[in-house]
């Protein structure tokens, strides 16, 4: 009996333990817990007790068990998300593997084709060597012509003005396009830096040794094929150089496809060349394997076809068979192959900028990769992968970026049919002034009724172009963006900001010469690969006298910056427009800014560097232009064309004064850009440059004497052996000292700011004397350097100097700089009072 009772007691205890470990919840209890989990996945102890009191159905469950349920629920949610993520990555990897295998097959075919061509050429050479009446060149050329133009009579037998004739041209264009997209019709070379992967943009290649320029991109997109085709056909939303596109006619075909007759106009990238237009046939069709394809080609004298629109200010370009192949993937999404192939008639372009029209890399960046990036951006927004924290929808932000680019392109091109006309010059052909007084220019703006402001005259644009030597475009654009005070005039900015109001200032300069203002950059949006930034710039006004208080208010700019990632072949630009503090989504913008496009070094052999406008303004050195083929150690010749355009509104009675102001302002900006370009040019490229001018103010001479004397007083050694006793000689030697020497202010409760640097110091910081004052010491030193300086600061104040060990600092452009060691000493003025701290970084170099 005792054993039985003891056994029954043990069983009851085991049941109690099991019931405490495992709880079977009813569906009603699960629903109640799920509702709480949706509101708060991790409730506190008090919230769990409150839940038990409020829900009678949970009264038989202990708080500890509810805590365990929420832990398990969070764990299941985490596992579900991780499983979903892994499945998505697996799908991407599978699709990318398929794409890479296809690319490998295509490359194998290309190798086989090259081997065959090589054998064919050897056979032809052997044949020519045994004959006397036929040259090698003629045989080879005849063979190539037969391959490239197999049967021109074929088009003559087709009535191209009928739907059947157009369909024949369309099918031929599609076959040629597919040969370029997936075959060996074009000799493709992969672009440097374009590494394929599940999260990369894809595989990007450019043409080699073909007619015109061509680019190809293929990648993964998580959208349906029809949506991809819809997005890519709408070029106005993603192709920044597209001015307008018009579908003149839509013709359905008997095989389920569609033929469209399309007319497109594109902007010229600079003022030195004419814009282009295209008259094309676009063919859309679904293939038997479920793929969707659309291709496009120009009507030519060979193909025939309907005559397209004509425009006097455009040069007709030819679009060779191009398009997009869209193939659905298992599990959703698709693989897309994009090909762009154009012949831009380079002979109508000045020779010096022909590289802009001969560069397949530039075509890839501006058109092919832009299309792929746009589709990927839309896909990530659609899937919720991109969160917008600015309160504006991504579509609105894209529209603002597009409006900035379109407005800047409009200012650069100044088409007559938009109302632009050229003003007479002041005798110098460096800056062009264009006027637009048509009411259409201001539709949708604050001047929607001209009766509100009868004296309103219109918009004036001052523009210029020039060649740049030895300066990477991305580096210069970053400098112009981060150091606005180096080139901008605050008085002109006040005038531009005032034009947003109902009564613009009648006087061009609110304050002649202006006064400096600091800028604060507020990020607004950025694209997936971070190659483009949309931001709001706040220009903080400062009043230095009572009469300046009215002009000291903050001003705002909407700014677009792209191409600063130094991607090969990229166009870098900085475009901005004044806005109100609370600008609307449909705000009228008047963009101004800079565009820098690299020139392909292959044209340098011609030795032609002088062209229109300011093209020769930056040719420096004793011999004028650079030698043919001159390049830096990285193999790139940093030669580019810079286009500047600034727009201003004006009242009709002050048109001439605003024009004079704009002309002078752009000339001053050109001078600033020249000075900046020389200052920030990499030191390895500056050996042939004219020596940069010394800071010639008396204050600089005095400061140089203080730096030299204080170094000797504190360290007991001379900084250098003075050539003579004159102050100018000391400044000259200090300025050309091989080590980087710079001075910092020392103020209580304030960050140390650089006040002076010699040429080596400016090169190390990648800045100029004017912009130097915007750089703080703690932004240059890394964390280790700041700690060492802080530990040595008391020693510096007591003994007058200290040695700092080797380390790494950062330039104003974000590049790491290493140095062997550094010396810090107090600079004393004539009264032996502390004036500033001097730093000398010995044997510095960029990492």
Image (spheres, rainbow, N blue to C red):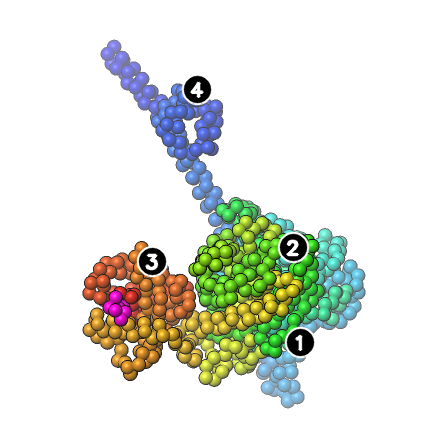
Which residue is drawn at the image coordinates 60% and 62% (left, top)? 506
Which residue is drawn at the image coordinates 51% and 66% (left, top)? 512
Q: Position of residue 142 (x, y in %)?
A: 66, 79
Can you tell which quarter of the image residue 123 is in?
bottom right
Q: Position of residue 81 (x, y in %)?
A: 46, 41
How many neighbours does mark 4 have within 10 angstroms: few (below 14), some (14-19), or many (20 or more)? Answer: few
Most extreme residue toward the front, as rendered?
546
Answer with mark 1 or mark 3, whichever residue precedes in sequence: 1
CA distance separating discs 1 and 2? 60 Å
Q: Which mark is residue 56?
A: 4
Label 4 sits on a secondary structure element that is: helix
Give the residue at mark 2: 447
Answer with mark 2 or mark 4, whichever residue precedes in sequence: 4
- Marks 2/3 in contact by CB < 8 Å: the verdict is no
- Marks 4/3 in contact by CB < 8 Å: the verdict is no
- Marks 1/3 in contact by CB < 8 Å: the verdict is no
Label 3 sits on a secondary structure element that is: loop
Label 2 sits on a secondary structure element that is: loop
CA distance separating discs 2 and 3? 45 Å
Q: Position of residue 510 (x, y in %)?
A: 53, 62
Give the residue at mark 3: 751
């Amino acid at each position: 009996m005792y054993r039985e009772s003891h056994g029954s007691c043990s069983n009851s205890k085991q049941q109690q333990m099991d019931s405490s470990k495992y709880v079977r919840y009813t569906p009603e209890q699960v629903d109640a817990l799920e509702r709480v989990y949706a509101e708060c996945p991790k409730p506190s102890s008090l919230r769990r007790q409150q839940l038990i009191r409020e829900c009678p159905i949970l009264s038989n469950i202990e708080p500890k068990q509810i805590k365990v349920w929420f832990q398990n629920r969070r764990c299941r949610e985490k596992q579900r998300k991780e499983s979903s993520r892994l499945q998505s990555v697996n799908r991407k990897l599978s699709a990318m593997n398929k794409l890479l295998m296809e690319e490998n097959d295509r490359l194998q075919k290309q190798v086989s084709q090259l081997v065959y061509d090589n054998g064919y050429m050897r056979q032809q050479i052997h044949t020519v060597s045994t004959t006397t009446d036929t040259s090698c060149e003629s045989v080879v050329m005849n063979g190539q012509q037969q391959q490239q133009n197999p049967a021109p009579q074929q088009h003559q037998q087709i009535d191209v003005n009928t739907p059947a004739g157009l369909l024949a041209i369309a099918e031929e264009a599609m076959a040629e396009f597919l040969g370029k997209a997936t075959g060996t019709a074009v000799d493709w070379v992969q672009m440097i830096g374009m590494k394929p992967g599940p999260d990369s943009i894809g595989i990007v290649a450019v043409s080699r040794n073909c007619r015109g320029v061509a680019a190809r991109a293929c990648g993964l997109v998580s959208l349906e094929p029809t949506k991809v085709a819809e997005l890519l056909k709408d070029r106005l939303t993603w192709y920044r150089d597209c001015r307008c596109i018009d579908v003149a006619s839509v013709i359905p075909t008997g095989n389920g496809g569609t033929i469209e007759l399309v007319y497109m106009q594109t902007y010229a990238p600079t003022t030195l060349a004419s814009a282009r237009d295209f008259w094309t046939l676009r063919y859309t069709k679904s293939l038997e394997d479920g793929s969707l394809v659309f291709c496009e080609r120009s009507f030519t004298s060979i193909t025939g076809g309907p005559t397209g629109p004509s425009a006097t200010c455009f040069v007709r370009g030819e679009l060779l068979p191009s398009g997009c192949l869209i193939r659905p993937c298992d599990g959703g999404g698709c693989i897309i192959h994009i090909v762009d192939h154009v012949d831009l008639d380079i002979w109508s372009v000045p020779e010096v900028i022909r590289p802009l029209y001969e560069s397949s890399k530039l075509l890839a960046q501006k058109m092919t990769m832009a299309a792929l990036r746009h589709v990927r951006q839309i896909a990530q927004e659609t899937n919720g992968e991109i969160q917008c924290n600015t309160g504006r929808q991504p579509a609105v932000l894209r529209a603002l970026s597009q409006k900035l680019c379109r407005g800047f392109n409009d200012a650069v091109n100044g088409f007559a049919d938009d109302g632009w006309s050229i003003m007479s010059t002041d005798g110098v052909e460096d800056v062009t002034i264009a006027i637009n007084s048509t009411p259409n220019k201001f539709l949708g703006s604050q001047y929607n009724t001209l009766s509100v402001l009868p004296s309103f005259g219109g918009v004036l644009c001052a523009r210029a172009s020039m060649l740049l030597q030895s300066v990477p475009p991305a580096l210069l654009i970053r400098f112009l963006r981060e150091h606005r005070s180096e080139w901008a005039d605050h008085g002109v900015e006040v005038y531009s900001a005032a034009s947003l109001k109902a009564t613009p200032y009648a006087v061009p300069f609110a304050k002649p010469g202006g006064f400096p203002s600091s800028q604060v950059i507020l990020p607004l949006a950025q694209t997936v690969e971070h190659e483009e930034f949309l931001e709001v710039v706040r220009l903080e006004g400062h009043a230095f006298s009572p009469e300046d208080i009215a002009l000291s208010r903050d001003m705002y700019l909407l700014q677009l910056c792209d191409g600063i990632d130094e991607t090969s072949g990229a166009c870098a630009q900085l475009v901005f427009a004044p806005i109100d503090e609370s600008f609307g989504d449909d705000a009228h913008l008047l963009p101004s800014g800079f565009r820098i496009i690299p020139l392909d070094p292959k044209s340098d052999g011609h030795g032609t560097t002088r062209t229109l406008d300011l093209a020769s303004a930056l040719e420096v050195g004793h011999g004028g232009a650079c030698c043919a083929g001159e390049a830096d150690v990285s193999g790139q010749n940093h030669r580019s064309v810079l286009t500047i355009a600034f727009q201003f509104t004006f009242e009709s009675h002050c048109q001439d004064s605003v024009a004079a102001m704009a002309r002078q302002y752009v000339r001053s900006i050109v001078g600033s850009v020249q000075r900046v370009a020389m200052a920030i040019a990499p030191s390895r490229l500056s050996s042939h440059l004219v020596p940069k001018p010394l800071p010639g103010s008396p204050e600089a001479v005095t400061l140089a004497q203080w730096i030299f004397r204080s170094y000797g007083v504190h360290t007991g050694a001379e900084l250098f052996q003075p050539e003579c006793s004159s102050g100018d000689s000391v400044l000259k030697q200090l300025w050309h000292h091989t080590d980087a020497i710079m001075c910092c202010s020392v103020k209580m409760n304030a960050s140390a700011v650089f006040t002076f640097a010699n040429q080596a110091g400016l090169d190390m910081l990648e800045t100029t004397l004017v912009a130097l004052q915007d750089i703080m010491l703690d932004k240059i030193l890394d964390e280790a350097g700041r700690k060492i300086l802080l530990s040595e600061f008391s020693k510096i104040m007591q003994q007058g100097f200290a040695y700092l060990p080797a380390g790494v600092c950062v330039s104003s452009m974000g590049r790491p700089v290493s140095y062997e060691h550094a010396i810090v000493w107090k600079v004393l003025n004539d009264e032996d009072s502390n004036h500033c701290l001097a730093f000398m970084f010995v044997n510095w170099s960029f990492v």
